[in-house]
Amino acid sequence: QVQLVESGGGLVQPGGSLRLSCAASGIIFSSYVMGWYRQAPGKQRELVAAMTSGGSTNYADSVKGRFTISRDNAKNTVFLQMNSLKPEDTAVYYCNARIDVFGTSRWGQGTQVTVSS
């Protein structure tokens, strides 16, 4: 059974920081591209950041310089460090695992991030 479990979401003021974690099981973690997506109310789900096992990364333009994706292959965990948070970052954040761009995506249940004063 493939399982991705996100944690670390919550309420934070603009300019604050949060660190999201995603613990994976049921996959050979080091073989997968891991990513973070988000979905705001009434909007499409969008890619936030992704990272290959070898360390290559991609970020949405809206988060470059503020968010950092990392992974610990020994612990089967991927992280998203979010700094300088803005109200427009408010969304449900989902963990994603995919063997490659053509593979089937695996999804976590999501964790709510709310940025508000």
Image (spheres, rainbow, N blue to C red):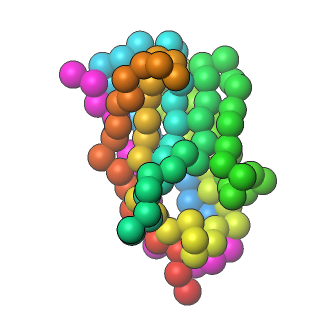
Q: Is residue 32 visible?
A: no
Give coordinates of residue 13: x percent, y percent.
58, 78
Judge from the rendering whether residue 8 lies leftward or rightward of residue 84; answer left or right.
left
Instruction: Name above or below for residue 13 compared with residue 106.
Output: below
Instruction: Name the residue nearer the viewer: 62 or 19.
Output: 62
Q: Quadrant of the C terminus?
A: bottom right
Instruction: In the displayed orientation, state which residue is furthest to the left.
Output: 1
| Residue at figure coordinates x 38%, y 55% from the top left | 111
Give coordinates of residue 98: x percent, y percent.
45, 24
What is the count of numbered marks?
0
| Residue at figure coordinates x 37%, y 23% from the top left | 104
Give coordinates of residue 94: x percent, y percent.
41, 47
Give coordinates of residue 17: x percent, y percent.
62, 64
To which quarter of the image does residue 62 belong?
A: bottom right
| Residue at figure coordinates x 52%, y 36% from the top left | 35
Q: Quadrant of the N terminus?
A: top left
Instruction: Name above or below for residue 7 compared with residue 26.
Output: below
Q: Is residue 56 visible?
A: yes
Range of residues picked out in magenta:
1-16
Judge from the rendering whether residue 106 lies leftward or rightward of residue 113; answer left or right.
left
